[in-house]
Amino acid sequence: MSAAARAVTEAAARAAERVARDCYGRLVALLAWQWRDLAAAEDALSDAFAAALRTWPEQGLPDSPEAWLMAAAKRRLLHEARHTRLTQDPAVTALFGDDTAAPAAEAVPDARLRLMFVCAHPALAENVRAPLMLQAVLGLDAQAIASAFLVSPTAMAQRLVRAKARIREAGLRFDPPEASELPGRLAAVLDAIYGAYTLGRKDPDTPAGDLREEAVFLARLVTALQPDQPEAWGLLALLLHVEARRAAQFDAAGRFVPLPRQDPTAWDAGLAAEAEQALWTAARLRQPGPFQLEAAIQSAHAQRRATGHTPWAGIAQLYALLVAHHPSLGARVGQAVAQAEAGDPAAARATLDALPAAAVQAYPAYWVARAHVLRLAGAAGHDAALQRAIGLTEDPRLREFLLSQAVPFSGPA
Amino acid sequence: MQFMLIYRETTAEVGRRDDPAAAPAYWGAWNAYIGALGGAGVIVSGNGLQPPRTATTVRVTGGQRQVQDGPFADTHEHLGGYFIVEVASLDEALEWAARAPCASAGSVEVRPVLPPPPAQ
């Protein structure tokens, strides 16, 4: 291949990648919505991208790559349908006219949200919703998703295939949920986005690190498409507050720095301000929920930048509200830490002791909190809890930090 | 379900055992990890191993014994130990694999254990 031809090929490949990032979710959402078949839509789009990589270097970039891909994918779907006689529904084939115009701008993001609602449908297993959303809406590959969720790639691929088959067989509706079921359905979408974010937070150096940004992107998208839903704003505020502290989480030597020891001037003021704005938008809608409460807790931590101290008593009250209405393991552990920091280690111990042993035995945050609470209370068992936390921690930098807090181990006999 | 977790360490990670500055953190991390496995009640059996240089390898080729100092082959990751764990699923075994100190300084292989042969 000549240098000039190679340059054209590379330009086409770059253009296809750019289009893929920009519009994959929109295209697959629109196709899946029209065709009622997520797997077929993804296959057709992936064929269209492959065709683009063959055709564009020879024929030059089309005026609208997105419309070109859409048309190619539609042809592919129609061909498949004719070939396999899967469907004779004139309402479906009518959608596959010769229109090559790019989909109308307003209809497109709407289709993406519909796709998110399908991916987080209550009929699907909870553990497949976030992976499915990342694959269908963002086009992440199964290998990267499997690594992020710590599942074997084969098992993850099977889970995704089964979920798509279930969508097809159960005829899950791609139509927007009824007004009455919207809050519940939206909560499942937000939970899946939050799940993707917390996975991405574990280790910034793995492919999972990207999931964090993808999750923030999805959270922003939901607020843009459902601006009157306070929990969507609450989730966005929560994620942005946590994002604002990313750079302060590790010092110059790469060592982990826990939140109370972070330098607040290292927090990203722009992201924090945007988070506060999102929380205000949520508050004006006057309908509190768990993500808004979590965001309010993070907002209270962020106050340290302005005031120099953390309002632990207020944080403990926010946790009490959260636990009263939306109890979860994470919320109870957070509540215990806030109670201890606010000067009531006895209440903190009671909160931790009330948690079922089976639920906490492999949950490192519990053992970190337990060690901290016992130390503040001047009680025994602090080091044993710390050891448990060290043994359960995946992140080597967090492990190093916890080891530095523990009684040094002298080595095997 | 039973799985064997096979812990492999990079040469640098193995070297930490003998480095006075690094050894306390090295052993501390493994001690805590094994303590957590034990605390969760998933250990069936298992052991850490002495370093690779202590190995002796035996082969019988064409009826001839061959004995060699050192492990089976020079590789950049060395077998450091193993545990057999009883857990509900492969996903849970992978969680335990990821928590091992050598997961970020080597690798952990997870293999299902063969069921015992049927009694004669």
Image (cartoon, coloured by chain):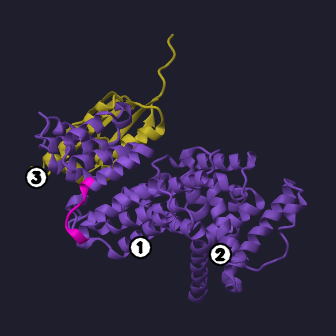
The disc numbered 1 marks a residue on which chain?
Answer: A
User: Chain B is which colour?
Assistant: yellow
Residues indicated by labels 3 and 1 sit on the same polypeptide chain? no
Q: Which chain is purple?
A: A
Q: Is residue A325 above or below residue A219?
A: above
Point out the image quarter for the C terminus of chain A: top left
Span of residues in magenta: A306-313
| Image position of B66 (left or right of A238) | left
Disc 1 residue type (three-letter): Glu
- Distance (Cα) linking label 2 and label 3: 54 Å
Q: Of all residues shown, which one is farthest toward the top? A: B120
Q: Is residue A232 above or below residue A362?
A: below
Point out the image quarter for the N terminus of chain A: bottom right
Disc 3 residue type (three-letter): Ala
For label 3, the SS is loop
Is residue A21 visible to us here?
yes
For label 1, the SS is helix
Which residue is at a point 75% across and 49% down the rendered structure image?
Answer: A171
- Distance (Cα) linking label 1 and label 2: 39 Å
The disc numbered 2 marks a residue on which chain?
Answer: A
Disc 1 marks which residue? Answer: A274
Residue A166 percent across, percent down from the top left: 69, 46
Q: Quadrant of residue B7?
A: top left
| Image position of A208 (left or right of A335) | right
Which residue is at a point 63% across and 63% down the rendered structure image?
Answer: A113
Disc 2 marks which residue? Answer: A53
Disc 2 residue type (three-letter): Leu
Q: Is residue A310 highlighted in magenta?
A: yes
Q: Is residue A120 above or below residue A99?
A: above
Disc 3 marks which residue? Answer: B21
Residue A74 percent across, percent down from the top left: 78, 68
For label 2, the SS is helix
